[in-house]
Amino acid sequence: MSTSCNQQHDTEQYDNEQLSQSRRMLVIVWAAIGCLALLFVAIQVLGKVWPAVQLLLWGIVIGFICSPITNWLEDHKVPRGLAAFLSLLVMVGIVSLVFTLLLPPFIEQTINLLRNVPSYVSSLQEMFSQFMKEHQTIAGTDVQAMLSSSISSLSDVLSRLATDMAGKLSGGIVTNIMGTLSDLFTMFLGLVMAYWLAKDYPVIIHEIAILVGPKHREGMTMLFAVMSRSMGGYMRGIVITSVVGGFLSYIGFSWIGHPYAGLMSITVGILHFIPVIGPWIAAGLAMVLALFTSPTLALFSLLVSVVAQNVTDNVVSPLVMQSAVKVHPIMSLTAIIVGNALGGVLGMVLAIPLSAALKGIFVYDFETRTGRQIVSYEGAIFKSTPFHDNEGAILPSFDALDDDRFFEYTRLVPRVKNVNVTAETPPDSIRPTIADVVRRYNEQLGTTAFHIGLSRDTNNSDKPGATSATDATGTGGDGADKSTTSHGTAGATSTTSATQTMISDTPTTSTKEHHDNV
């Protein structure tokens, strides 16, 4: 009797488990359908309100780029409102200077290129004729018929494009002028928004922290920290590396005698904003245009492009892209495709920093919930520096940011608590790259300057009437605990007295900064 009761109980338990699994699967399916429906609605709404979103994004990007100048001026006793205004003036002045210097040669060489297109077409026809004389057929295929068909199709496409462009230029002058005025007005509003963001973002973030409450304050802080490091660091770095890459390309192309050195260097700088594929497209264009002069010049053009790109990526980029989360090429390409589909050029520019921010947020959330460390030196998508405290516990905030000094300098966290952070020693199988060596050397220089600044502050505090940079509690003038950092050589352990995020109840601003103030 008891055996039959047990069997009946087991059967009921099995049926309940099966029913529970079916319900869970049903919930998952309907949740997925709901998410897809919401995504579709969001895309439709985004298409309607994209001009407003574009304005907001431009303001955020410009505000992030201007924030270091604003913070530096504020550190030198300039009121923050005036500092934000001056930083915008500096940025607008630099952009205007760049356009003034580059626009005339760009237009001149573009006109020359268009004038030379017929001669280039003639050269191609001669090459095709010579090729067809030597090879009438290949594997039974009529080469002449194939090439004639291809050239005819290409000519039709070019004719349609030329007709469309002529129609737009002749019949849409008023429309083009109105569109230009609209774009200029949008840029002006973006500058106005950037001013207020650069001026008030520390207070705005503090107010948002109050709104979300103590329970979600740390998560909100990490969200803004990752966004700040990804967006601000990446945008500032990509602007600098684009300018440097274009300048190096101009020197190289001019040295080898490229007929379109100015045009190609500007193209290199612009396409550098498109990661992974942009530099290779620029190199291909430079090589193709040089090929019409001589094959040797084309080879040298490719060599110049490769050298300039490697110097930019391995020497310049580690110096200016420290405050940017790394993104795997697969994520980069996917983000570029999605960004182009959703937002055009602006979407492509913002795709990489946004994907980096999403990666950092995921790392923080995953490691916080599971207690497992997902980042590692030998990873792919999550390849990064693993951090631990003195007891060997993982630190999700530092893993998400991939930076053991971010909390020492950021203004997003007014009050912090000191913790000892240790970067895991890289395995012997991983050899430091040129970028790693340059980055480590730069960090050592920054650490030395940081210690010198602290020693000067300490010496000044011994003088009568002087104020110490850190008080008896170890809290600096900005309400943040200052700490020291020591970075070892390749394969050594890096130990940092860093910070754990914690927001105070009163907003404060920093008076000492030694890094990219974000």
Image: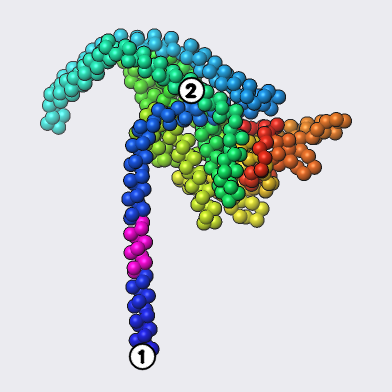
In the image, residue 391 sits, relative to residue 469, either above or below, namely: below
Label number found at residue 60: none
* Identity of the residue furthest to the bottom in this view: 1
Q: Amino acid at mark 1?
A: Met
Q: Amino acid at mark 2?
A: Leu
- Mark 1: few/some/many CA within 10 Å (<14, 14-19, 20+): few
Q: Is residue 144 left or right of residue 480?
A: left
First to last magenta residue range? 18-28
Residue at the (76%, 38%) spot, across then down: 470
Residue on which disc 2 sits = 189
Q: Position of residue 256 (x, y in %)?
A: 43, 15
Quarter that holds the C terminus: top right
Q: Position of residue 398 (x, y in %)?
A: 58, 45
145 in the magenta segment: no
23 in the magenta segment: yes
Q: Is residue 250 left or right of residue 169?
A: right
